[in-house]
Structures are given as structure tokens and as C-alpha cells.
Image (cartoon, helix red, strand yellow):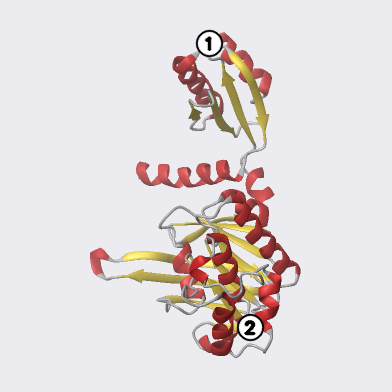
Amino acid sequence: MTSTYAVLSEGLEKRFGSGANAVHALRGLDLAVREGSVCGLLGPNGAGKTTAVRVLTTLLRPDAGTARVAGHDLARDPGGVRRRIGVTGQYASVDGDLTGRENLRLFGRLLRAPRGRAEELLERFGLVEAADRTARTYSGGMRRRLDLAASLLTRPAVLFLDEPTTGLDPHSRNEIWDAVRELAHEGTTVLLTTQYLDEADRLADEIVLIDGGRAAHAGTPAELKGRLGSYAEVVVTEEAGEPGLHAAAVVLDQLTGSRPVLSPERRTVGAVVLDPAVTLPRVVRELDACGVPLMDASLRPPTLDEVFLRLTAARTTKEVAA
């Protein structure tokens, strides 16, 4: 049953506190991450992503549920789990007073990594020239690469990355992305939490949207986008101004049944189209009938950002209605 899954959890629960003040971070989380894949965990702040990682890496004990990670039972064999995983948290854990080489050698001794593994990883992550500088002199991207290198000292079967590119510039993010792709290509299973939707779109084989401590939606990026149909976006003329934007928003709201998104800076209004009968010519005709002058109009597949906003907004709307 578990041979094709690197991470398999059923009904994981975790709460903090007790009584009326208890916070239920996980409410029956089910996950099935295939070996050698990249799984992206997405969700709004407070959805339970980091708690899920801390439970699956044995840093927190679940209150209920079961899980197997890299073939080891989380409750019965936490030591076996720890021997088979690597973890990179939200913040770099390297020692700023040590050099890059000293950091990796120290972690290597603690983890009983093979000799020469530190040098191999310095080479792999482009840190050889900076290896004898203290880590505090490294840029954010370099510290992140050093942190990732440390998590790979034992050649883990499963690598947990908790928001690994937060605060990094685009060049440094691309370097981390390249490293993740290479690891997955080599057979390492990667479980990635991120706030960057483009990151999940580019890296993940499958995405799990966690909301309210549960796996609310799951699928490939293409499958999740396909659930929402199309996205209509119009650009009003400069003369139309703010009144034109709001008039276009009213029309799109009536046509699509979705909450329009306005961008005054770009003079655009967009909305998810769920009704296949809504076509671009119909959008243009309705706006023309309402006297809204347009610069451009398009009907395209939704982005993952738009999927995320739509799915999380749907839950929020249901909760308010209840």
C-alpha cells in the first residue's frame, strides 16, 4: 500500500491549548505524496502548512491520525523517519560565525555523513569560492543554498522545504528552483510549502491546497486551473477612469457570477468564468451596451493565483453565510 508513496497520512490532527481557547491547526489532514515527486502545500496564513511539516518531520506529536514517511511509521519509528529525511525551515539555520565549510563539516559530523560529502555539496551549490568566509557575510540566497546543502548531507529520501525562498531576490529564487528540480530528477521526494503561487506552478507535480487544517483541494497545477474554466479580463480606456472600472466590474459580476478583481493602476478588471456560454464577444457586447470604453479584452486560462483566490474565497463566503 505504501510502496509508491513517500509520505502518506490519514486523519492527522493537532491542536494547541485546551478548552474554548484551543487552536485546531490540523483537522484530519490526509496526504499522499508519490515517491520522486514534488508536492506543493499551499494555503492562506494559519491554514496549517507549517504545523503539517513539523508533525511529519517528528518535531511535533500529532493528537490523532497516522502517517508513514519514507517507509517509517511516524508514531512507532520516529528515529527511522529522522534518518531518512532532510528539513529546511523558513529561516536559514546555519551558524553565522562559522564559515560555509565549517557549517557543513559540523552538520556532517553530527549526522554521521560520509567524509567528503561537505566538499561535494559546496561544489554542487556553487559555494566553493565562498567556502572559507563566515556565513554572516553571505547574501540571503547564498545562506539559503548553504542551508539546503546542510539538509542534503545524508542524501535524504524525502526533503521538506518550508517556504525556502521567502525574501529572496528573483535570481536567488531561480537558483533554489533549479536545485529542487535537480533533486526531484534524481529521485528525491520534495514536500514544499510556499506563499508564492508561481513557485508551486513551476515546481510542483501535484498541489494540495490546505484550508482550515484539511486538504481542501488537490491535483496537478493544470487540473486545478481546469476546474475554474477561463478568466475574463478587460482594460478600460484612460478616459473611462474609475467610474468605467466599476461599471465593468458590475457587468463581469453579472456575467460570470464571480467576484471581479480590480486593478486601478493597470486599468483592468478580471473575473473567473464558470459558465462556458460566456464568450469574449459577449463580454465586449455587454460592456459596449453599458457604455464602457475598452482598450483590450481577453479570455484566457486562469493562473494559479486566481485559482487560489477563488477556492479560498469560496470557503470564506460559506463560513460567513453560515
**Quadrant placement of the C terminus:** top left
Residue 321: image location, x then y, percent: 36, 41
Name which quarter of the figure residue 293 lies in.
Answer: top right
Q: Give the residue type at disc 2.
A: Thr
Q: Give the residue type at disc 1.
A: Cys
**Quadrant placement of the N terminus:** bottom right
Farthest residue toward the right?
A: 185
Q: Nearer the viewer, mark 1 or mark 2?
A: 2
The residue located at (67%, 89%) in the rendering is 115
Q: Which mark is residue 149?
A: none
> Where is 256 relative to 91, above or below?
above
Residue 139: image location, x then y, percent: 54, 61
Residue 128: image location, x then y, percent: 67, 72
* For marks 1 and 2 on the same chain, the one whose residue lies earlier in the sequence: 2
Q: Secondary structure at mark 2?
A: loop
- Disc 2 target residue: 154
- Disc 1 target residue: 290
The residue located at (66%, 78%) in the rendering is 157
Q: From the viewer's side, name the closer residue of 13 and 142.
A: 142
